[in-house]
Image (cartoon, rainbow, N blue to C red):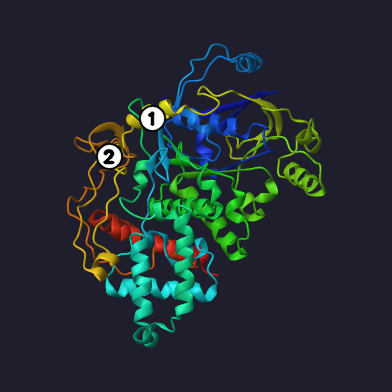
Amino acid sequence: MTDISEIFVAGGEREHRLLTRYANRHGLITGATGTGKTVTLQVLAEGFSAAGVPVFVADVKGDLSGLSQAGEAKRKIVERERALGLGERTYRGAPTIFWDLFAEKGHPVRATVSDMGPLLLGRLLDLNEVQSAVLNVVFQVADDEGLLLIDMKDLRAMLTFVADHASEIREEYGNVSSASVGAIQRGLLTLEQQGGDLFFGEPALDLEDLMLSAPDGGGAINVLAADRLMQSPRLYATFLLWLLAELFENLPEVGDRDRPKLVFFFDEAHLLFDEAPKALVDKVEQVVRLIRSKGVGVFFVTQNPLDIPDDVLGQLGNRVQHALRAYTPRDQRAVRAAAETFRPNPALDTEAAITELGVGEALLSFLEQDGVPAMVDRALVAPPLSRIGPASESERAAVQAQSPLGGAYDKAVDRESAYEVLRGRPEEEAAPQPASGPWRRPGGEERRGGPWRDNDAGTAPAKSSTRRSTRAPKREKSAVEKVLLGDGRRQGLAEAMAKSAVRTVGRQIGRSLVRGILGSLFKR
């Protein structure tokens, strides 16, 4: 299964196959509502999974849970298979792991407040410049006092502490007004009412658990239930940007590979760029460009190609364009822009074809063997082998019961941190350890139970059995921050080994580094 080097996506005058070696050149799937974007995403996701590549995708409508179930030979599917000459196919579900920020439809996804960092959190709370500066002071005081910021009550306790000691803090850190502290507290209350408080806590997400391989070698498809999350668009966009930044910060350089380590589908991608300052867009463009060497492919999914800034659009080598309707002047501009992004095909009027495509039809251009975009072609997208449509609640529950991560994230842990130190509450138990299971992490080691074995990328670092320190490490400028701020030197072998050693000490030290990239991303 895992020796697949290309994914069949569509057929027209010729077959259209996405080469896995160029998946880290990223991609774009666009089209109006109801034209087939979700099915195309599904075909690509299960294709990557069959090739042994883990996938992360946000399920904004609930449809993608069907990836876990075998498809059916329905009339329209059979007709499409015959039109493409696919012959007999075996329908099957893909190895799927469900996630949910609200812990209702999958494993909880958590990060600590320290992971998020003051600048990204300030954007999430929609703080102004003065309020954001005060939030930075709160984080700096917590660092200097050695207080961990894990969940929202930690941050509330620190805000109260800083407000109560404003006169002493003013001399070293600057003025902290009660009005700004109050505004931040109100923002936290609003975020809590939207369910955002469920995101902050422990056990925090381990990135390696997004890159598991099933017993048959297929890459796990991580489906984030985002239908409820979409009611808070800023939280949705901030979470996905945080996850992308975490991957960029923590994954090692691997260069070009036969297939990526992870493919990340960013649905409703316009939310990332809505009302975003140019400085942020510039940094996102840099991350998209640089994360290629980390072995990560990013596919943006949105209705209109104009939703993606030009600098980011220029980084997307694989394109699938479904139908657009030119009813308004903006729609007409979008059609022209979409047509101009393709390599011209003398036999095809690209601009006219975009408005004529039927459901399940698309214009496609993937990178060819030499890395050059293919000429645009009109084609029928192949039906997936998994179910088109959502899984039932009982089916989802059955998949969840077989998850290799059972017990690892489902129970929240509240250990000693800023709130407990400031209030004098005793420390709680450490995070529970997952039970044994057959799924494997990127290096080939078992996700749970038994000795860790290495089949590919060197010996995995030993896991520390000691509890993490309750004293927060000081923030240090990361290598990524230096790159994004202008220091373009690549790390040497000694530096890479030192970083690896640091990561084995404990997750908290590694977690503190991500604030470097997030600070760079959102620094204006």
Q: Position of residue 64 (x, y in %)?
A: 51, 33
Q: Quadrant of residue 459?
A: top left
Which amino acid, by three-letter code, is at mark 1?
Ala
Circle 2 sits on which residue?
A: 407
Image: 183 above or below 470: below
Residue at the farthest top position: 88
Image: 199 above or below 170: above
Q: Quadrant of residue 310?
A: bottom right
Label 1 or label 2, whichever lies nearer to me, is: 1
Image: 46 above or below 185: above
Residue 203's tag is none
Q: Quadrant of the C terminus?
A: bottom right
Q: Position of residue 5 (x, y in %)?
A: 49, 30
Q: Position of residue 445 (x, y in %)?
A: 27, 37
Q: Quadrant of residue 10?
A: top right
Q: Is residue 487 visible?
A: no
Residue sitting at x 34%, y 58%: 511
Which amino acid, by three-letter code, is at mark 2?
Gly
Residue 496 appears left or right of 74: left
Front-most of residues 430 and 363: 430
Residue sitting at x 59%, y 52%: 271
Q: Are marks 1 and 2 in contact (CB under 8 Å)?
A: no
Front-most of residues 12 and 36: 36
> At numbered mark 1, what does the secondary structure look like: helix, strand or loop?
helix
Circle 1 sits on which residue?
A: 397
> At numbered mark 2, what does the secondary structure look like: helix, strand or loop?
loop
Residue 326 appears left or right of 91: right
